[in-house]
Image (cartoon, rainbow, N blue to C red):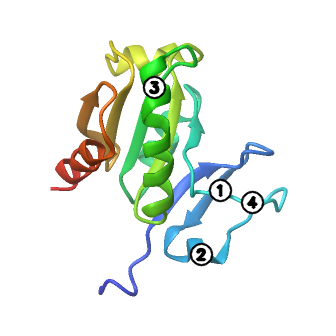
Amino acid sequence: MNESTRTARALVRCPFCLTFNRVDLTRIRDRPTCGECHRPIVLDRPIKLTDDDFDRIVNGSDVPVLVDFHADWCGPCKVIAPSLDEIARERMGQLLVGKLDTDRNPATATKLKITALPTIAVFKGGREAARQTGAVPKRVIEDVIARASG
């Protein structure tokens, strides 16, 4: 199958009605909508992940999933947030970017042994492929993505 005919799908939750939707990322520029409420599903910014949907979304994606494990009170987490927004916008359709608040979702953070914030991890095929801790520049985040893809 060549590059132009291959599909890449991701399972995401509608931010409005919380319905799971399978989105064809090769057609992301067509502006997909939720199958239930018909509101837009926007993937040009990080999506919110929770303990309840983390495994399902990470396992349901054909593309790598970059997850920012953060907390609202964490200053360094706020420092890297703009870089993650840029990466989500620049790699829309090739990479799914999510954010998981570890204070509100401690089970996932505990299961993955997240001990410092911010921590970013890239999941490929449902498995963690790379991890980086700390407020790092965008180029380092891009290196983590590349390391996970290699």
* Residue 30 x %, y %: 65, 77
Q: Nearer the viewer, residue 34 or 100?
A: 100
User: Which residue was labeled with disc 1?
Assistant: 21
Mark 3 is surrounded, within 10 Å at the Cα level, by few (under 14), some (14 to 19) or many (20 or more) other residues, namely: many
Q: Nearer the viewer, residue 59 or 28?
A: 28
User: Which residue was labeled with disc 3?
Assistant: 77
User: Which residue was labeled with disc 4?
Assistant: 34
* Residue 118 x %, y %: 39, 24
**Disc with the residue nearer the chain's start (1 vs 3):** 1
Q: Are marks 2 and 1 in contact (CB under 8 Å)?
A: no
Q: In 3D space, how far apart are the residues under numbered discs 3 and 2 (Cα atoms)? A: 29 Å
**Disc with the residue nearer the chain's start (4 vs 3):** 4
Q: Is residue 50 left or right of residue 126?
A: right
x 29%, y 40%: residue:
127
Q: In 3D space, how far apart are the residues under numbered discs 4 and 3 (Cα atoms)? A: 30 Å
User: Which residue was labeled with disc 2?
Assistant: 29
x 68%, y 71%: residue:
31
Q: Is residue 139 left or right of residue 119?
A: left
Instruction: State the SS at label 1.
Output: strand
